[in-house]
Every structure is written in structure tokens, then in C-alpha cells.
Amino acid sequence: MTTTLTKPAADAGSPPPKRVRRPKSARAGGQMHAGPIAYVILALFTIGSLLPLVWTAIAASRDNQRLAQTPPPFWFGGNLFHNLDIAWNDANLGEAFINTTFVAGVSALTIVFLSTIAGFAFAKLRFRGRGAMMLIVIGTMMVPPQLSVIPLYMMVAKLDWTDQLQAVILPSLVSAFGVFFMRQYLIQALPDEIIEAARVDGASSWRVVWHVVFPAARPAMAVLGMLMFVQTWNDFLWPFLVLTQNGNPTVQVAVAQLGRGYTPDQSLIMAGALLGTLPLLIVFAIFGKQIVGGIMQGAVKG
């Protein structure tokens, strides 16, 4: 005897069930789309970020007399290239660009190399006092850098390094932020199994660092290198104390010389600031996509 199960028929008077439609963002494979409010907020943040740079270019294209008037100018003038030429020659920006590129490049490469090694040690190696040493490294970030100016200057003066580039490079060869940044990245991005597999294959510690740690940390190394390069390029206080315009000036020291005088020419100062900013904008325009891609790759790996 065969029993057949039948689905009970719906009542004749009941309405048919309604079909629930899911939004496009909730469907499989769908992407979330920004609404008009998100575009307005992003536009406001973009305008606010570009406003200082645009105002610098506007001020650099005017003369000092026009900048002193009220209201100030809100559009470009015709003196931009004239002011840029005067600022370039008066501030000796050609030599300053070379010096700053050398200082920032050496500092960024050294910080990335040392921070990656130290970050790997704090993240994956087990040794006595690891936690206390990490707390000391983080604690140095809480100390204002102005407190170290006098001891550093005394040290540089004893070494007879005043007005020399090594006086600027030496204090910037290590970074507590870089060590902490790389440690936090390697904790998530570098599985312990890969290190153990390399150890089983007979790899030494330096070989593990070179063939395992550096490839895994490449996205974070690119980001850290960019941040440290920009930070060193924009550093003003310490280079201003140990360097002079007639010796080995950096960009910030050279631009600061444009503000000297009884009545500083604001248009020339803005022209020098614009010239000092352009290399960073060019570097970010060229490598910005790779840096952002490295951040996203590291986030997916983590």
C-alpha cells in the first residue's frame, strides 16, 4: 500500500503570500552603493583637504601688497612663475632638494629595515623581557621630542657635526612608531606555521627574515616608508637648529630663510612652500595606488 503525501491546499479566500524583495546590496555578489549624503560628506572633506594647498598656490601667484589687503584674493594672479623663480634662486632650493631627498631617503630606508626586524622579534620571537621592552618602546612615544633637543645638540656639537647632514640623519634612524606599527602588522599577517616550516627546512634566523618576513611585510613596509619619508621631509625644528642656509640646508630650512627681513614677503614664502610640497604630491601621485593597494592586501591577509 502506497501513501502519498499531498500539500494542503490554501484557503480559497486567503490572499497569496507576498514575495519579499531584498535590496541589491544584500544580494549575493552585490556591492554596497553610497547614497547622496555620503557623496556630500566626501565632497566636503575633499574640499577641506585641498583648500590649504589651493590657497598656497593663490597666495604664491600674487604680490605681498595684494595679500595684505582686505578681503584677500580668492583667485590666481599672474605672478606665480615669477615668484617661484625668485624663491628657487633666493632660497637655494636646488641644493636643498638634493639634501632633503638624501636625508629623507636614508632615514626612511633605515627605519623600515630596522623596524621590520624589531617588529618581527616582538611579534613572533619568545625571549625574556619581551613585554617590558615593548612597553619601554611605546613609552618613548609619549616623550615630547622637544625634550631631547638640548642633549642631541650637545652630542652633535661634541662630534663637530653642526651644519652637516649626518646631524639630521642620526636622530631619525630609528622610530618607536615604526617598531610598533610593524609588530602589529606582523602579528596578523605572518602565521606561525610559515616560520615553523622554514625552521624545519633548516633556515637560519636571517634567512627567515629575508625570505619570509620581508615578503610578508612588504605592504606595511611600503606604507611605513612613505610615512617616514614625508615626516622627515617636513621636519623643521631639528634641521633648523643644526643646519644653515649657507651650509647644507634642507627644504624647510631654505624656505624659512625667505621669511627673514623687516617685512617678510608672504608671496615668496608661499611660493617656496609650494615648491617644497610639489615633490611629495608627485611621489604620492605615482605610488599612491600601490600604497593603497598594499594596505588593502595587508588587510585581506590579516
Image: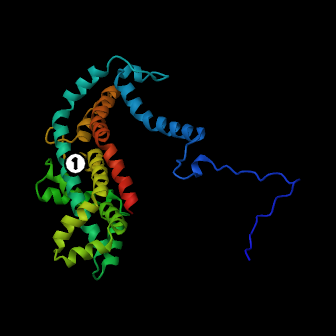
Residue at point 51%, 40% (across, down):
42
Q: What crowding class fits label 1: few (fewer than 14 Cα within 10 Å), some (14-19), or many (20 or more)?
A: many
Q: Is residue 40 above or below residue 66?
A: below
Q: Position of residue 96 (x, y in %)?
A: 19, 38
Q: Identify the amino acid type marked 1.
A: Ala
Colour convention: rainbow
Q: Is residue 154 above or below residue 250?
A: below
Residue at point 16%, 40% (across, down):
98
31 and 227: which is toward the camera: 31
Q: Is residue 284 above or below residue 63?
A: below
Q: Position of residue 143 (x, y in %)?
A: 35, 63
Residue 173 can be seen in this image: no
Name the quadrant containing residue 174: bottom left
Residue at point 19%, 27% (across, down):
89
Q: Position of residue 48 (x, y in %)?
A: 48, 37
Please state, as top left, top right, bottom left or bottom right, where the N terminus lies in the image: bottom right
